[in-house]
Image (cartoon, rainbow, N blue to C red):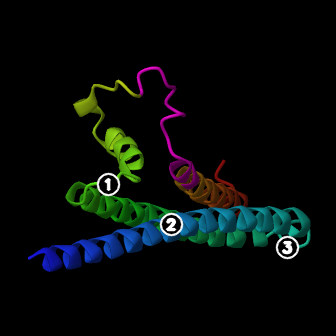
Amino acid sequence: MASKKNGSQKELIIDYQEAGEDARDFTRRIFQSFYLSLVFLAFIITAIATGYDQFPVMLPIASILSAIVFLILHITIHKNKGSRGSALARRQEIESKIEGLKTNRSIMERLVAKQNRHKFGGRKYRGKDWRERRSASTWMEYFALAAFIGSLIVFVVFVIYSLNFIFNWF
């Protein structure tokens, strides 16, 4: 019986380590997606600034292309955040089964507190500003979403301006 318990405990420890590696991998992917969005934003701004005079058609093409790319990056960051949360929840589950594994507790308590503030009465967050309660990955997700919306707005404004120029509506 003891060997079976040790065997399952070893499997749980291996699963615990794999869940930690998965969480780190998803965190790395979140940051890489954000860095890619910054590089892409710089590329789009440079392309529009240098080529708009010679190729005015480039603005709507660049804005719709950037909207698509930023939407994909936003979805990628969002999915990786969910997967990272699942991996951290698995670690929390294993910690509850094996005594002595408490390395993940502070991370999970913070994440659970964010999701279930009403259960904790907001004690941890009462003195903090709303910006301080957001994680870095949440701000990265907001950035990609804002860049997507901004690209769509630029595209819509250009289309309305072009239609006004063609049909002289306004």
Marks 1 and 2, the one that precedes in the sequence: 2
Q: Which residue is mark 3?
A: 55
**Where 98 sits versus 25, above or below?**
above
Say which of 65 and 59 sits in front. 65
What's the CA distance linking mark 1 and mark 2?
A: 21 Å
**Residue 170 percent location from the top left of the image:** 66, 47
Q: Which residue is mark 2?
A: 24
Label 3 crowd (10 A; few <14 / some 14-19 / many >=20): few
**Where 125 sits versus 11, above or below?**
above
Q: Are marks 2 and 3 in contact (CB under 8 Å)?
A: no
Marks 3 and 1, the one that precedes in the sequence: 3
Judged by depth in the image, the label closer to the viewer, 3 or 1, is 1
Judged by depth in the image, the label closer to the viewer, 2 or 3, is 2
Say which of 159 and 140 sits in front. 140
- Farthest top residue in view: 127
Residue at disc 3, secondary structure: loop
Label 1 crowd (10 A; few <14 / some 14-19 / many >=20): few
For this view, does 8 lie left or right of residue 21? left
Residue 140 tag number: none
**Where 135 sits versus 50, above or below?**
above
**Residue 133 percent location from the top left of the image:** 48, 36
Indicate the amino acid at tag 2: Arg
**Where 49 sits versus 21, above or below?**
above
Residue at disc 2, secondary structure: helix
For this view, does 159 lie left or right of residue 142? right
**Image quadrant for the N terminus?**
bottom left
Say which of 152 and 15 sits in front. 15
Specify the quadrant of the image occupied by residue 116.
Answer: top left
Marks 2 and 3, the one that precedes in the sequence: 2
What's the CA distance linking mark 2 and mark 3?
A: 44 Å
User: Which residue shows up at 55% across the image and 69% down it?
Assistant: 29
**Residue 169 percent location from the top left of the image:** 64, 52
